[in-house]
Amino acid sequence: MPDEAAEQRTGGSVWEAKQAYAMAVFCLVAGLAIGYLFRGSQPPAPPPQPASHAQPPAPAAAMGGRTPGLEEMKQMADKKAAPLLEKLKNDPNNSDLLIQVAKIEAATHQFKEAASYYDKALQVDPKNVAIRTEMASCMFYAGDVDVAVSQLQLALHYSPKDANSLFNLGMIKWQGKRDPQGALAAWEELLRSNPQLTPERKAAVQKLMADVRAKRKS
């Protein structure tokens, strides 16, 4: 797994065992997978804060505890992103600025917009696996499951053992594609290619796999 410094350089977020399993359990009733992955008829709960860059407060906190509507969140994103967008006018290929804008958009649930900025950052740095995984999450939130899967597969082309990409691929295969066999294959590869996983993380993946197998039998 990447160390903390590497995570901060890429802007990626790493799933923890408790977070991963708690979100996976929740997905059984609300369609939530992990990290930014969400698809449903209701506005999603605020995504977790990224590992790097200053971020806007969670929308509910910003509105005095009241969950804002999507239009209000868009206004929040526009206001927060404005100074960064001004800088991008003079430096349009600055991947760090593009990623910061993407994270603001994602944190305020503007997932299509976030994905577009991640895509621009990836045009500058196509091998940035952490950011490609973030983009895939946004595409899944936006309802484009096939693009999310293709982005994760491309991430794995660059880094075949990437634990986050394999874990997310399994979750999308399971929850987005209704493909339990594909989910199990991704997680089996995750365990096989990442023997350094902590016992807690390994146990979380194994529990998910057991749940998938149990549901297949039932």
Image: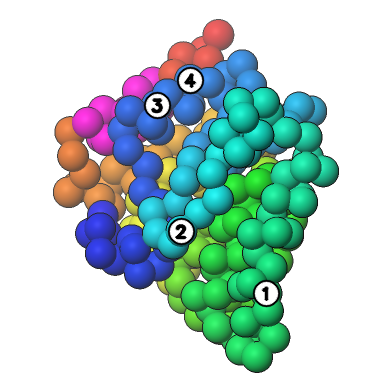
Identified by mark 3, the residue type is Tyr
Percent coordinates x, y for residue 205 in the rendering: 34, 32
* Residue bearing mark 3: 21
Label 2 crowd (10 A; few <14 / some 14-19 / many >=20): few
Q: Residues within 10 Å of mark 1 (few under 14, many from 20)?
A: some
- Residue 121 drawn in magenta: no
Q: Is disc 3 in contact with disc 4, using a CB cutoff of under 8 Å?
A: yes
Examine the rendering and report whether any part of residue 83 can be seen.
yes
Main secondary structure type of the part rendered in magenta = helix
The residues bearing labels 2 and 4 have C-alpha atoms spaced at a distance of: 30 Å
Q: Residue furthest front?
A: 64
The residue under the point 21% across, 44% down is 197
Counting from the top left corner in percent of width and height, residue 24 is at: 48, 27
Circles 2 and 4 in contact, beta carbons < 8 Å: no
Regarding mark 3 in the picture, which secondary structure is present there? helix
Query: Does label 4 or label 1 sit earlier along the sequence?
Result: 4
Q: What segment carries the magenta color? A: 200-210
The residue depicted at 36 percent of the width and 48 percent of the height is 14
Marker disc for residue 25: 4
Upstream in sequence: badge 1 or badge 2:
2
- Which residue is nearer to you in this view: 174 or 19? 19
Asked if one can make out residue 173 in the rendered structure from this viewpoint, the answer is: no
The disc, 3 or 1, on the residue closer to the chain's N-terminal end is 3
